[in-house]
Every structure is written in C-alpha cells, then in structure tokens.
Image: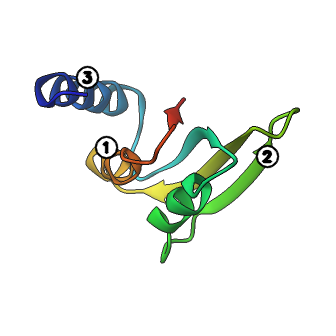
C-alpha cells in the first residue's frame, strides 16, 4: 500500500472502530498466511508479551494457515498498531 492509501485505510478503520466499539474491548484479529515460510511465527511474535489467545487452523489442503487472535485492547489506536506490526508479513491477508 502506498502511504496515502495506507493512511486513508487506517483512518477509515479507526472511524469504524470508534463508532462500533466500546473501549476497552476484546478484539478478534483474523489473518490468513501461507503455511510455508515464517508468516505464522511473525504474526504470533507481534503479540508476544500480551495475554492474547491465539488459534491456528490449517486449510483443507494445508497450503494456508488461519490465525485468529483475541486480545483485550484499550483503544482503536491500539488495535490499529497491531495491524501495522504485522503488515509486512509476506502473503498476509487480513480479514
């Protein structure tokens, strides 16, 4: 994502989060990454030192892994900060 589009995306996400959430809140992140490679470990390490609940599930053919992470956070900015932490993971799809 280029910088302007990235900023616009995160601004809209923040707006939606503020409108639909009461903070603090438990937020569910859902990511899909290729199973081969370091994507799963990179995502999990972004949430190290938190009380996050992480659930990984392989796709039917085993090529992809779904990573669901539930974490209690204090603000929309905190939610977005984790999206930014994992944004560079190769092959990442954020749901």
Judge by depth and name the residue closer to the eye, 54 or 16: 54
**Which label was assigned to residue 57?**
2
Q: Which residue is mark 3?
A: 12
Q: Residues within 10 Å of mark 1 (few under 14, many from 20)?
A: many
Q: Secondary structure at mark 3?
A: helix
User: What is the count of numbered marks?
Assistant: 3
Of mark 2 and mark 3, the one earlier in the sequence is 3
Residue drawn 65% across the image and 47% down it: 67
Residue 60 position in % (x across, y down): 88, 32
Residue 74 percent coordinates (x, y): 36, 56
Q: Are marks 1 and 2 in contact (CB under 8 Å)?
A: no
Q: Which residue is mark 1?
A: 76
Tell me the quadrant of the picture where the N terminus can be found. top left
C-beta proximity under 8 Å, tags 2 and 3: no
Q: Quadrant of the C terminus?
A: top right
Residue 42 percent across, percent down from the top left: 50, 60
**In-front residue for pair 75/41:** 41
Q: Is residue 7 left or right of residue 34?
A: left
Task: Please rate how many residues cluster around mark 2, counting C-alpha atoms within 10 Å: few if below 14, some from 14 to 19, many from 20.
Answer: few
Q: Quadrant of residue 9?
A: top left
Q: Is label 2 or label 3 in front?
A: 2
Q: Residue at x 30, y 51 (%)?
A: 81
Q: How is the image coloured?
A: rainbow
CA gap between label 1 and label 2 equals 27 Å
């Amino acid at each position: 994502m280029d910088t302007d589009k990235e900023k616009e995306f995160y601004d809209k996400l923040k707006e939606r989060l503020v409108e639909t959430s009461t903070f603090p809140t438990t937020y569910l992140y859902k990511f899909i990454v290729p199973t081969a490679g370091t994507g799963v470990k990179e995502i999990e390490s972004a949430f190290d030192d938190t009380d996050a609940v992480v659930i990984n599930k392989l796709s039917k053919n085993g090529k992809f892994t779904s990573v669901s992470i539930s974490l209690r956070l204090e603000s929309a900015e905190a939610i977005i900060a984790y999206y930014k932490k994992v944004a560079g993971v190769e092959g990442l799809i954020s749901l």
